[in-house]
Image (cartoon, rainbow, N blue to C red):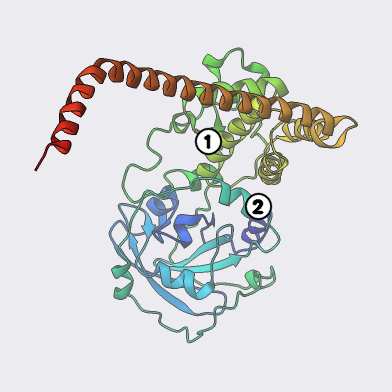
Amino acid sequence: MIRAEEVQSNLEPEFPSFAKSLVRSHVGSCFWMGLPGMFCKIHLPRKDTMIILEDESGHQFHVKYYSDKTGLSAGWRQFCSVHNLLEGDVLIFQLVEPTKFKVYIIRANDLTELDGALGLLNLDAHTKQSDAEDAEIGITACKSTKRKRPKSLPLAVVQKKNKRSGLQTNLGQPAEQSENDSEEVGSEVLEGFKLSVPTIQFKDITSFENFSILVGDLVIDSELSEDIRNKYFKLCCSQNSFLHENIIQGINFKLIVGTISETVNIADAIRACKLTTSQDEFDSWDKTLKAFDLLGMNVGFLRTRLRRLVNLAFESEGAADARRYVEAKMERAQTEDEIRNLEAKLAELKDTCKTFGVEIESLQSQAETYELRFEEEVQASW
């Protein structure tokens, strides 16, 4: 987003613009592009209409804009496919005509380590758009059939003068751009959220009761269970700061929610680990935390604890003997369980044997009498 902001700052200010960081719902699954609600309210038509998206090469694409849902759908899949857009890319939309956007693409080529964080989180899209809608719209002037990923837009390109008349300027603030951002199809955008109070320093937090998790101008408490929030509060207290306060600006709030939740889960797993915990598990936790660290999450103290535990469990003198001791105890316990199971089975077989013995004794005299009668019949003369 920092690079995108640099590009956006070089655009002519007379044309309103905003930046969008792409998430899964934009480029996969439902192919829905939600636009900032305040931007749409000020600059776009109040009814459903066709919007033109023009890329850096001048190729134009027609997509359907839904005013009540403040988003793009039919035709958006084609735009994504032609430009090979991926999660993590950033788009800058510049409104150069009442229903025409100039779109600049900022590639996330050198942010590959963040892909691990994105893949680890559950960013389920709650919207479904019919793929059949894409058949309504065609590409006007793009004949390219290759899926080769183009390079990021150079800053010089966006310094060109765009000409337009009769369009008011309103760049808006980042908070306005994120407000009512319709990542979901429907009018209940960001339902359950509330505007934040003025920024609070962590030192002002006196108890869990007045602890709230703010992302930009939104309080996301409703997205997390009370148990997760309580544990996250304790983690923040241990560092005397909000762990997410330096997270990269512009990241989708659902990614931040998932990051916080997974951080709490990993902290719980670290507390519950044993000498028998495998190194693969430790490595998996550290890989996830490293990705969160790249996002700006303060998880360094957890990674430090992990390194100490790995050193004690696998690398320090006596670690192998200690692990073997614990493993031997577990194996002995398993063997003792097997012995108890066998003893129980043996006792059961002995009881069964006794039952057969009682039955034999009770039937013995009668069986012998019938056996004699049978033998007499066998030996009788013809």
Tell me if residue 373 comes above or below residue 117 in the rendering: above
Which residue matches tag 1?
Answer: 217
Percent position of residue 294, x then y: 70, 46
Residue at image point 76% right, 30% down: 305
Percent position of residue 165, x then y: 46, 69
Q: Which labelled disc corresponds to residue 200?
A: none
Residue 290 horizontal side relative to residue 364, left or right: right
Residue sitting farthest toward the right: 317
Residue 342 horizontal side relative to residue 71, left or right: right
Near mark 2 (Cα within 10 A), the count class, few <14, some 14-19 or many ≥20, is some
The amino acid type of the residue labelled 2 equals Leu
On the question of residue 374 being in view, the answer is yes
Q: Nearer the viewer, residue 253 or 29?
A: 29
Q: Nearer the viewer, residue 370 or 96?
A: 370
Foreground: disc 1 or disc 2: 2
On the question of residue 201 being in view, the answer is no
> What element does badge 1 sit on?
loop
Which circle's residue, 1 or 2, is located before the other in the chain? 2
The amino acid type of the residue labelled 1 equals Asp
Q: Nearer the viewer, residue 57 or 355?
A: 355
> What element does badge 2 sit on?
helix
Which residue matches tag 2?
Answer: 114
Quadrant of the image containing the C terminus: top left
Residue at image point 44% right, 52% down: 39
